[in-house]
Structures are given as C-alpha cells and as structure tokens.
Image (spheres, rainbow, N blue to C red):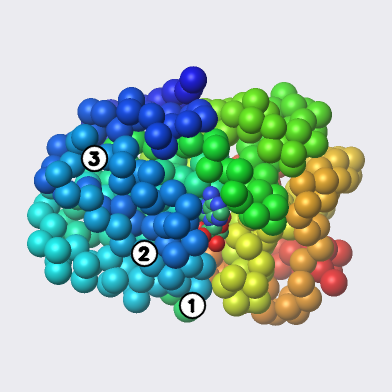
Amino acid sequence: MSETVSIDLGERSYDILIGQGLLDAQAPWRDLPRAACAVIVTNDTVAPLYAQRLQQALAPHYARRLVIELPDGEAHKDWNSLNLIFDRLLAEGCDRKTVLFALGGGVVGDMTGFAAACYMRGVPFVQVPTTLLAQVDSSVGGKTAINHPRGKNMIGAFYQPQRVVCDLDTLDSLPPRELSAGLAEVIKYGPIADPAFLDWIEQNIGALMARDKAALAHAVKRSCEIKAAVVGQDERESGLRAILNFGHTFGHAIEAGLGYGEWLHGEAVGCGMVMAADLSVRLGLMPAEFLERLRQLIARAGLPTVGPRLGAERYLELMRVDKKAEGGEMRFVVIESLGNATMRPAPDAVVRDVLDACTR
Ligand code: NAD
Ligand code: GLY
C-alpha cells in the first residue's frame, strides 16, 4: 500500500509516492516519460543493494537500462562526478529523451538532478531516494547542485523531477548514523510549520529510531506534505522557502569548516538547529524552554547538540558566503512562535554569543 503527496507547481507538478515494496511494484514506474533508454545514477554503496531491482522494475518501460555508479560520499559531490555522468551518457549515445533515475541519498539525488538539468539542455529525471533525509527533504522541491570548495551547493539549478518514489523498505539497510541524520530534517518541520507534528515526533522518536514502518510512513508523509506546501508557494526561494533552511546557516558552516564528510549534513543541521533556536531565544523571540525542548529532542534522535570549536571568526567567515547572505550580511532562519519561522539578520555580537554557548 502506498500514499501519494502531490506537489502543485503548475505544469511542473508531480507526485511523491510513499510506501513499502515500491521498488519491486509495477505501478510506481508506469506513465513516466517514454524513452529508448533509462539511466540509473547511483553510487558504489547503493548499487549492489538496489540497482538490479530497479533495472528489473523499469524493464517493461525502457528497452535499454544503464547503471552509472559514482563514488560514494559528500566529498564526491563535485565536477568530477558530474562529468562521469555526462561522459557515460555521451559515450552510450543517450539522446535528449533519456530518463535519469536518481537511486540513492541526497548526494546522488542532487547531482543526478543537476546532470538532468544540464544534459542536452534538460532531460527528465525521477527521484528514488533511499535515505530518510532524501525521502523527507532533498528529493522533493527541485533543488539540484554540486559543491564548490568555497561553499556547499554553490553550483546548481532549480529543476523538478517527474516523480519521487520513496520505498520505505530501502531504509532497512541504512546505517543508524544516517537514520539519525534524516531525523534532523524531520524534526525541522515541527518548529517551522507544525507544532502538532513536533509533539508527534517527541512521542514517536523511539519508534522512528527503531524503524517502525508505520511511524516512518507518517514522518515521511507529513514532512513531504509540509515541504510540498512551502515549495508550492515559493518554488525558487524568493522568500518563504528559506524557512526550510532552519539550522542550515550554522550547519553549512560546520560542514564546510570541518571539511565535507566529517560530519553528516543531517548532523550539522541538527546541531545548527540548536544554534538557531539559541539565536531565536537571544533575539527575544522564543522562551528559553523552547531551546531546551529542541536540544533534548535532537539528542534523543542521536544527533550532536554541541558544535565544533572552529573559532567565531571562521564561523562568521563561512556564514557570510551562505546563499541567504545578502551584500555580506548574514541572515538566519529564526522561530518567531512555534510553527512560524522567518528570516532575519542578526548582530555579529549576538551570533558570537550563540557560537560561544553552543560550541566546544
Ligand atoms: P548521502 O547521499 O551521502 O547518503 C548517506 C549515505 O548512505 C551514503 O554513504 C549512501 O551511499 C548511503 N546510502 C544511501 N541509501 C542507503 C541505503 N538504503 N542503505 C544503505 N546505505 C545507503 O546523504 P544524505 O543524507 O541522503 O543527503 C545529504 C545531501 O543532500 C547533502 O549533499 C545535502 O546538501 C543534500 N540536501 C539537498 C537538499 C535539497 O533540497 N536538494 C535538501 C537537504 C539535503
Ligand atoms: N532543503 C531546503 C529546500 O529544499 O529549500
């Protein structure tokens, strides 16, 4: 049984299918763009687990099915990996109707989406996310990118997939640390959009950590509903969509400051949300209990709540190149009231206080 969340973007609208057994089912792969060739882009960890099954599921619809295996890891979210995709597509004579299938986590999804946006000026692609983080966040909404040594996700495009297929069974093989990283993005949706969902996560964090499928199904569905509603109103982040980056300004600085791959993205976001909650309290927007509540939930999800001591200057330098910065002024997503987030500048002195309190 699967559930469907729709994202309404006019002619770029699509469905997000959520359920168990979807990889081996027929329905999720019907009525996609027709082509002679389907190309599964994945990595050397996910390919042995799931690529053959996806190839089989696609067999009735595409005469040729190729698999491109990229090296695994955030450190490989770069031009070299992107070129591996282009080189193979060209070497195999893939035409402009070729459909790409991103099978993997957010790294594979972001890179495949960017490759799809660029190859022959745009080919269709489908997201088949296999991490919790990708199922609740990165596969939805059309942000695609690679990293630049000077900043994360700095080179990319908005490019929507044709469909997102979230098979919850793929989460069975996910390492526990990656499950926790995904929970960071699930938790994010509570404070920014839905206090009742925050209550629910607190009550069900044990079930989520134990990979209870009913709990995961609800978490993925509600997360996708919230993300779809936000992206449906502000696809290209002219304003509202920035709330989805709660915790990310601090988080991206942690990732870049330590070197990509040292902390997982979700770990950096989890800790970044503690910092952003601390900032919300220091700016007088939220009571201190909110910070403690969020800190406890993030810790229960197995995530770090104290940031690395990179030094305030280094944090500030890294945060000034964040995509939300304008004219060198840092801007942060803060919580104004539970379920209501906005973006604001913050005085350097207050940010320094946050860094002092939240790093060790
Ligand atoms: P990831 O893609 O690196 O996957 C995490 C690890 O799990 C990898 O080693 C991967 O090979 C492995 N893996 C994937 N599926 C597996 C499975 N089913 N079983 C076993 N192992 C599996 O990391 P992620 O957390 O999925 O994604 C993080 C990336 O997503 C970052 O680059 C981040 O910038 C990006 N992101 C993008 C958006 C967006 O809107 N586009 C949103 C959030 C995050
Ligand atoms: N993950 C942030 C966004 O999609 O906008």
Task: Check disc 2 and give the amino acid type.
Answer: Glu
Task: Check disc 3 and give the amino acid type.
Answer: Ala
Q: Of label 1 and label 2, which has the lower sequence position?
A: 2
Q: Is mark 3 within 8 Å of ligand 1?
A: no
Tell me where residue 210 appears, x and y as whole percent: 74, 39
Tell me where residue 183 appears, x and y as whole percent: 67, 45
Task: Check disc 1 and give the amino acid type.
Answer: Arg
**Residue annotated with mark 3:** 59
**Residue annotated with mark 1:** 150
User: In this picture, is 222 found above or below 71?
Assistant: above
| CA separation in Å, label 1 and label 3 | 41 Å
Q: Is residue 203 left or right of residue 149?
A: right
Q: Are marks 2 and 3 in contact (CB under 8 Å)?
A: no
**Residue annotated with mark 2:** 69
Tell me where residue 69 appears, x and y as whole percent: 36, 64
Q: For the point 17% across and 49% down, which residue is it?
A: 64
Q: For the point 22% across and 59% down, which residue is it?
A: 118
Dot 3: few (<14), some (14–19), or many (≥20) neighbours within 10 Å?
Answer: some
Q: Is mark 2 within 8 Å of ligand 1?
A: no
Dot 1: few (<14), some (14–19), or many (≥20) neighbours within 10 Å?
Answer: few
Q: Quadrant of residue 63?
A: top left
| CA separation in Å, label 2 and label 3 | 19 Å
Q: Secondary structure at mark 1?
A: loop
Q: For the point 52% across and 30% down, which residue is it?
A: 20
